Amino acid sequence: MGEAMAPAPRDSTSGGLALGAGAAPVLLLAVALGCGDPPPPARAVPDAGPAAVVAAPPALPEPATATGYWAAFFDDVVAGDRDAARAGYEAALARADVDPQLAARAALRLADLEGAAGNRRRALELVARAAALGTDDDAVQDAAERQRARLMAAPSGAADVRGPAVGTPLPGVAPAVAAAFAAAEAQLAQVHRMRMVPVLEALSSTVRAKQRATEEAVRAYRAVAEAGGIARVAAQYRIGSLYHDLALELVFDLPPELDPGVASRLRRSLRTSALGYLKKATAAYRASKDEPAADAQAWRAAADADLRGAEALLGER
């Protein structure tokens, strides 16, 4: 998902060094990792652009965290071992309470990997976490905004929907419930295809349209949830995912031509709405997890995973 940067096949605005022009810092990194010590600060690379986001790691209270992050970065950029890199970045993100700055960079690197894999929703959540963790880091904020803009512009795919695929059947439910669930799933797919346009002429109308479509889909799923059992588990999970995704999409850069005072008020309003939707998402996820039902393990597992993500965002904000 990164911007092209010759000769590297993938540059990241999410906090990495570019290959080619940045080869010397990467080699220094390799030597430092081989000695078991955290890497020394890399020199600034002319014209490195967004790659400079983490070219020099900040002062860290926990050296092991830094070493683990840079080992993951080495696996990602130099060795090309995405699985090892993902595990290292996840470990750094899990230690956000120890080093939020490094966790923010790890979240951006993970978002880069998720975006490249087509997992747009997960990538947006990671970008949001990075922005929340790196509140006082202008480089992180700039990189997060650029990555968020690219993700918002990316086309939707099958992996764009949280949890089980759209149209997943509910075993054992009555035909009327199955039909109602299928209709709600169609509304969900329609909501996911809608994109809010962050330009002055369409900003308010697209935000309101997305909110209305989300609430209409939520009402459809609430009707399904009344059947109880697996229908309630699945419907509550979908309600949570709708609010979760809307919350993430409401945080975006406003048009530069907007009056600064108006922009400040609108930004606060959007963020307040986003937090409110996140709280609704967590309530729905918990309702999904707490409903006893057979054959609902996949839905409950998805609710558990997305509940942790939403709660992490709430805690960091």
Image (spheres, rainbow, N blue to C red):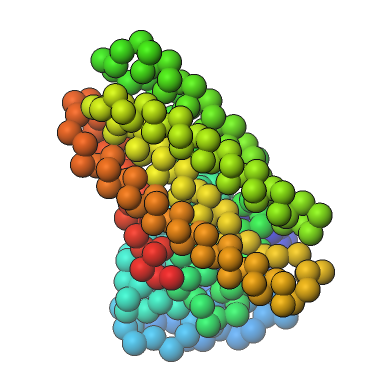
Q: Is the C terminus in the top left, top right, bottom left or bottom right quadrant?
A: bottom left
Instruction: Establish if 256 lies above or below 8.
Output: below
Residue 190: quarter of image:
top right
Q: Nearer the viewer, residue 61 or 267?
A: 267
- The residue lying toward the viewer, choosing from 198 and 66, is 198
- For this rendering, which residue is in front, 215 or 312? 215
Please give the name of the residue rendered at 51% of the width and 59% of the height, measured from the top-left corner.
274
Horizontal placement of 37 versus 296: left or right?
right
Identified at 74% across, 77% down, the residue is 260
Residue extending furthest top?
A: 175
Residue 96's x, y, as percent? 36, 72
User: Residue 267, image x and y in percent?
Assistant: 62, 68
Left or right position of 80 against 157: left
- Vertical position of residue 201 compared to residue 40: above or below: above
Q: In this view, does 231 lie to the left or right of 59?
A: left
Q: Does residue 126 appear anywhere in the picture?
A: no
Image position, residue 147 (x, y; %): 62, 60
Q: In this view, does 255 lie above or below 223?
A: below
